[in-house]
Amino acid sequence: MKLPQPLKSCLVAYLIVFVVAFVSIPASAVFSQGKASPVTFWGMGTLGVVVIVLGVMLATNFRGSAGAYVSLLKDYKPMGVDYSKSFLANPKFVRIFGAMFAIVGVWFIVVSTFMASRLS
C-alpha cells in the first residue's frame, strides 16, 4: 500500500503480461503444431514495454518510487529475512536495478521482433 500509484499499476500490469506471455509459450507448442504463435511474440514484446516503463520509473525515482521500493524492502521481511541493513535496501541500488531492468526490456523487444520477422 505504500507504493505510489503509477508504480503499483505498472507492477500489476507486469504481473498480468508476464502470466500471459508465460502461458502463451506452452500453449503455442500444443495448439500450433510446433509453430510459434504470434501471441508469443506479442506477449514478449509487450512484456518488454512494461519492463522498460517499470525500469524507467525506478531509475528516475518517479514520484518517489525508488524510495517507496526501499521502504517496502525494509518493512517487509520475506521468509523472515531482514533486508534493512543490506545493500538491496539502498535507493541507489534500486535506481541501478531499474536502469538494468529497462535494458532487459529493450532486449525483450529486440529479440521478439527479430524472431517474429525471421519466422514470418
Image (spheres, grey):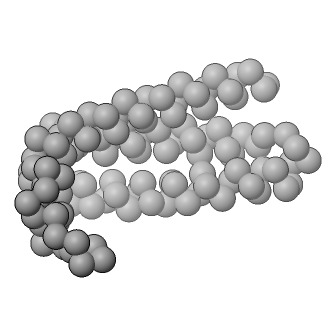
Judged left or right of residue 111, residue 70 is left
Vertical position of residue 37 compared to residue 2: above or below: above
Location of the C terminus by quadrant is: top right
Considering every residue shown, the one lying at the far right of the view is: 33
Location of the N terminus by quadrant is: bottom left
Residue 70 is drawn in which quadrant? bottom left
Judged left or right of residue 62, residue 7 is right
Residue 74 is drawn in which quadrant? bottom left
Residue 68: percent from left, percent from top: 12, 59
Name the residue located 45 percent from the left edge and 60 percent from the top edge.
Answer: 15
Judged left or right of residue 26, residue 89 is left
Name the residue located 67 percent from the left edge and 44 percent from the top edge.
Answer: 40
Residue 58: percent from left, percent from top: 21, 44
Name the residue located 18 percent from the left edge and 52 percent from the top edge.
Answer: 88
Residue 71: percent from left, percent from top: 10, 63
Considering every residue shown, the one lying at the far bottom of the view is: 80
Give the mark count.
0
Name the residue located 42 percent from the left edge and 35 percent from the top edge.
Answer: 105
Can residue 42 be seen by looking at this rendering?
yes
| Residue placed most toward the observer, 26 or 14 | 26
Residue 79: percent from left, percent from top: 30, 77
